[in-house]
Image (cartoon, rainbow, N blue to C red):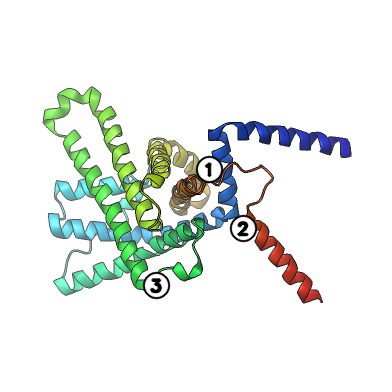
């Protein structure tokens, strides 16, 4: 058994040296290790939880505002709603059947309803801010108070709303009669423009969440990874969710839609957190990392826990 263990150790060490020879593989290992050090799985689960609670208030708020401003039955309102639901492949059409406008009633009731929905939607923005602070290893005293956290959350929601509106504009332009003669180029053009919208949204979101001293150039790697990754997920999301729902719809019925929503939000949360970790690793030159190496921060935590355990025993 010892000889087998030694051969395994030598194989891992050889693979480790090979991965550290190339920048791409070395950075990739460092990002994965850093994600584990920061308990990224737990953070993505928290974002998914608050995201699930925030989806319906956000969609209801968007539907209400669009219906009140543009008219409930206008083509522009329908394009905006459809653009928002396209962020959720397969399950978007089913979510639409359960989202209805609150635009009827007096203006005070309308404003009160919007504020209530907006407050309910800030949960996911708060969880994103806390996860970003943790990954940038900021001290506890730098955590924003409720006013600053809410202001940043509103800015994040503004970025999300702007991306949805821009996507609806692109959809409206591509559906115009004048451009039908260029239909063979529409799909490619829509994909390119959609990717640019995702890249812009990712950059602005990462800029809002990153510490002030971090330069804009340091956010570009995560922007490229997140924006292109999210675009790829949007293109393949139909297959992923269809496969996921195919296994659960017969057992769970309509609850399978909730499972699909959780699955999709968790993928999106992990893409965003890995994009943040990529920025952190490159900005702090925290690479290369060994396959079996722990970060100094984690090693210090383990040592402190062991010391506290020894003191409690004594």
Q: Which residue is mark 2?
A: 297
Q: Secondary structure at mark 2?
A: helix
Q: Nearer the viewer, residue 146 or 280?
A: 280
* Precedes in sequence: disc 3 or disc 2: 3
Of the 4 image quadrants, the one containing the C terminus is bottom right
Within-10-Å neighbours for mark 1: few <14, some 14–19, many 20+: few
Q: Position of residue 94 (x, y in %)?
A: 35, 49
Query: Does residue 126 sit above or below 247 in this rendering?
Result: below
Q: Quadrant of residue 183?
A: top left
Rendered residue at 50%/60% (across/down): 134
Q: Position of residue 38 (x, y in %)?
A: 56, 55
Badge nearest the viewer, 2 or 1: 2
Left/right placement of residue 101 relative to residue 136 reads left
Q: Secondary structure at mark 3?
A: loop
* Precedes in sequence: disc 1 or disc 3: 3
Exactly how many numbered labels are in the figure?
3
Within-10-Å neighbours for mark 2: few <14, some 14–19, many 20+: few
Q: Which residue is mark 3?
A: 145
Rendered residue at 39%/38% (across/down): 228
Rendered residue at 23%/45% (across/down): 166
Q: Position of residue 155 (x, y in %)?
A: 29, 59
Q: Secondary structure at mark 1?
A: helix
Of the 4 image quadrants, the one containing the N terminus is top right
Badge nearest the viewer, 3 or 2: 2
Query: Does residue 288 sit above or below 254 in this rendering?
Result: above
Q: Which residue is mark 1?
A: 247
What is the C-alpha distance between the residues marked 1 and 3? Answer: 43 Å
Instruction: Find out whether the residues at labels 1 and 3 contact each other: C-beta distance under 8 Å.
Output: no
Q: Nearer the viewer, residue 169 or 313?
A: 313
Instruction: Find out whether the residues at labels 2 and 1 contact each other: C-beta distance under 8 Å.
Output: no
Left/right placement of residue 65 relative to residue 91 reads left
């Amino acid at each position: 058994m010892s000889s087998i263990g030694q051969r395994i150790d030598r194989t891992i060490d050889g693979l480790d040296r090979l991965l550290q020879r190339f920048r791409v593989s070395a950075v990739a290992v460092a990002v994965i290790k850093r994600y584990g050090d920061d308990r990224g799985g737990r953070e993505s689960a928290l974002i998914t939880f608050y995201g699930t609670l925030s989806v319906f208030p956000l969609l209801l708020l968007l539907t209400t505002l669009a219906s009140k401003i543009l008219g409930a039955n206008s083509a522009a309102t329908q394009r905006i709603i459809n653009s928002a639901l396209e962020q959720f492949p397969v399950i978007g059409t089913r979510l639409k059947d359960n989202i209805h406008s609150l635009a009827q009633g007096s203006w005070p009731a309308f404003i009160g309803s919007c504020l209530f929905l907006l407050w309910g939607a800030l949960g996911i923005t708060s969880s994103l801010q806390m996860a970003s602070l943790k990954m940038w290893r900021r001290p506890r005293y730098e955590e924003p108070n409720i006013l600053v956290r809410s202001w940043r959350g509103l800015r994040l929601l503004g970025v999300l709303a702007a991306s949805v509106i821009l996507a609806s504009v692109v959809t409206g332009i591509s559906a115009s009669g004048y451009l039908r003669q260029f239909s063979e180029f529409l799909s490619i053009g829509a994909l390119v423009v959609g990717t640019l919208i995702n890249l812009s949204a990712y950059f602005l979101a990462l800029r809002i969440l990153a510490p002030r001293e971090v330069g804009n150039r340091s956010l570009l790697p995560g922007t490229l990874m997140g924006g292109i990754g999210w675009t790829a997920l949007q293109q393949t999301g139909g297959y992923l969710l269809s496969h996921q729902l195919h296994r659960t719809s017969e057992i769970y019925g309509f609850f399978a839609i909730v499972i699909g929503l959780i699955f999709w939000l968790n993928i999106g949360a992990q893409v965003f957190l890995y994009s943040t970790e990529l920025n952190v690793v490159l900005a702090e030159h925290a690479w290369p990392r060994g396959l079996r190496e722990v970060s100094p921060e984690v090693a210090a935590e383990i040592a402190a826990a062991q010391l506290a355990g020894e003191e409690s025993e004594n």
